[in-house]
Image (cartoon, helix red, strand yellow):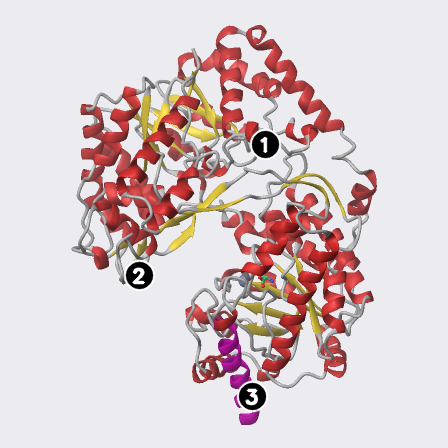
Amino acid sequence: MTIIHNLGFPRIGAQRELKFGLEAFWRGEASAEQLNILSTWLREQHWQLQSTLDYVPVGDFSLYDQVLDMSFTLGHLPERVQGLPGSELDQYFRVARGRSAGDSTGVAAGEMTKWFDTNYHYIVPEFTAATQFKLNPQRLVQQLTQARAQGVNPKPVIIGPVTYLALGKAKDESNKLALLERLLPVYAQLLDTLAAEGVEWVQVDEPILVTELDADWQHALNTAYHQLKSCKVKILLASYFGPLLDNKYLAANLPVAGLHVDATHDAGDVQQLIGLLPAHKVLSLGVISGRNIWKTDLSATLDWLEPLAERLGERLWLAPSCSLLHVPVDLDSEEKLDPEVKNWLAFAKQKLHELHVLGQALNQGRASVQAALAANAAALEQRRTSPRVHRPEVQAAVAAITAALGQRQSPYAVRAQQQAAHLRLPAYPTTTIGSFPQTPDIRRARSDFKAGRIGTAEYQAAMQAEIARSVREQEALGLDVLVHGEAERNDMVEYFGEQLEGYAFSQFGWVQSYGSRCVKPPILFGDIARPQAMTVEWIAYAQSLTAKPMKGMLTGPVTILNWSFVRDDQPRATTCKQLALAIRQEVLDLEKAGVRVIQIDEAALREGLPLRKSQWHSYLDWAIESFRISANGVQDSTQIHTHMCYSEFNDIIAAIADMDADVITIETSRSDMELLDAFEHFHYPNEIGPGVYDIHSPNIPTQAHIVQLMQKAAQRIPAERLWVNPDCGLKTRQWGEVIPALQAMVAAAQELRAAA
Ligand code: GLN
Ligand code: ZN
């Protein structure tokens, strides 16, 4: 009998019930008891949906974040909240968000960072040499009781000790790994507590097994599982988000009862692992992708599973590749999705159904699920042959790409002269990153338009009025390069996706990003075509209102790719190049319309980096090439800008320079220009605008502070190549904050010019 199980279920709710419940609680409009009723109900719903599984995950539900939950289970809270009044829930939200529901003043929220290579963000555990742990198993035990009462077979899920340490940050000079010795007894206690509750299997997640591990971390894994070996539960050690590669031998031989691996990447890697696996161990294969929204090819999966099932017998388990946290809940709620595209998709609920079909096919023969297999094969065949997916002219254009396409006519030094003659900008030119405040009026006009309450003409007039306002404000401020303000954009990816062919949009395809925040990535299903210009009308209108240069704003191909659900039937590199060709057409149309400064945002370039450093090179190769294809068809006198919102630059600075943008604007203000350290050894060749104030904060920067930051920048980069700008777009701010902040910024630039 092949066992089927799941690693984790999305907790936000099919209609984002958890989001709304949390936000009502934070506003003080719902009680802790109401929040508890809601989360109990959600867990019940989710277990109900998983009730055909042999084991269901317990403890995967979280009010904010599973890493934060683990910190609480380990009795590990940052020092700054220790001893503050209130319940455990108050403390929990203080660490998560800086305040609990009743607080009038806050504490610093825990730092947040990306969960491996997903778009989910966790709260970083904070370690010092003095960190102590103390078991607090209540949450898990209660959820276990609740699951039992519902009649499902529970498998508690926890984050493993080594991954937990790897995810955290030492706040002093201490070595995190030294804490392992203190941490392991608490894990042992936890496992024994679960054993006493009658638990048979515990899923212990160690996704760091798919990353590059040095000898110390390998040793830590060995130490940890040798020490936990005597606990009275069976451990299913779970790795996911990629193949094990050089960690196979280590993973196969850790003394645990079972191992789960992501089997969606590299079948050869799995075969080799099976050869290494001791004969008593359970092997759980993650054969259904928990990272995309496509149907699995069930027959092809069975083709390679059947001989394995024969060989492994009882030892074979099946599951999704990782927790389903990273996919939307239920495709059935989608009423507006094109039926043809919808038939190619599977969200969490549908993926569990696929798992069920696979399990039954292995246990009772394919004939027992013949109808399901036939329907699956028909859907896949339709996708494989659909003219909506395959456009020969787009494929031909990608095949015809040559290096020349990504090459500017002249080197930067020549271009810079032509641009200077053309744009006549002062030293320390000022600009912004693109968006101005998205006011309630803008949102109202957009939703009225979408709902058909106002017509196209009325909507256009409303957006033009907003653009005119932005231009007026920027002229009054005395900025040098203006922007139209992006009033018409709901989102920097969705806006372009809506106008490109090859994209579909869900109504409820939400995925948790952090806490109560969700994103709804558009679905890129087919070859990309741009039927008509997407931005020219708005930007040309803005340019018509001013004699100053207007910067045209676009989202770059790599960012569009990284923030979409993309197809799995061709390499990401190919999809990215298709996007690059579409953006290139837009760039050239803008240039033709007289727009001579064009910014192509690559906010998400860094987050596409593979988990293993050894694979960075190949990603950066096609990512940078895609950017170059999109940007570099313009004339020398047209100035290309790009923007990135992060400051960890050092390790990819050469690739960024290779983009050959004339100007790059980056986030730096929060790190006090720390980023510029990257330029100590690397001579960045082109112009750069290090963000001088943090747009995420309502604080108004002072002129003196901005001058000081720019002077710091000028120590690393020649002043004639520096720009002055905020560190990101201003859409989340209010005009009342934006005006004084930009006044200080412009005044600072004037002071710098006068001093030069
Ligand atoms: N141009 C975009 C804006 O100003 C950039 C947003 C971003 O970097 N995330 O909003
Ligand atoms: Zn940004």
Q: Secondary structure at mark 2?
A: loop
Report if the beta carbon of the residue with label 2 is closer than 8 angstroms to ligand 2.
no
Tag shown at residue 750: 3
Give x and y (percent) for residue 41.
35, 30
Res 27 seen here:
yes
Amino acid beneath label 1? Glu
**Front-most of 296 and 548?**
548
- Specify the quarter for ligand 1: bottom right
Residue beneath label 2, please?
A: 108
Give x and y (percent) for residue 626.
69, 54
| Residue at the (46%, 79%) spot, across then down | 709
Amino acid beneath label 2? Ala
Q: Could you tell whether 296 is left or right of 398 in the image?
A: left
Residue beneath label 1, please?
A: 334
Is the Cβ of the residue at disc 3 closer than 8 Å to that at disc 2?
A: no
Label 2 packing within 10 angstroms: few (<14), some (14-19), many (20+): few
Give x and y (percent) for residue 543.
74, 72
Label 3 packing within 10 angstroms: few (<14), some (14-19), many (20+): some
Sequence-first tag of 3 and 2: 2
Label 1 packing within 10 angstroms: few (<14), some (14-19), many (20+): some
Q: Which residues are magenta?
A: 737-756
Res 493 seen here:
no
Residue 631 sits in quarter: bottom right
Whether 578 is among the magenta residues is no
Say if 84 sits above or below 18 in the image: below
Q: CA distance from mark 3 to mark 1?
A: 54 Å
| Residue at the (19%, 46%) spot, across then down | 133
Q: Nearer the viewer, mark 2 or mark 1?
A: 1
Q: Could you tell whether 24 is left or right of 374 in the image?
A: left
Give x and y (percent) for residue 384.
72, 28
| Residue at the (67%, 66%) spot, across then down | 465
> What type of secondary structure mainly makes up the magenta span?
helix
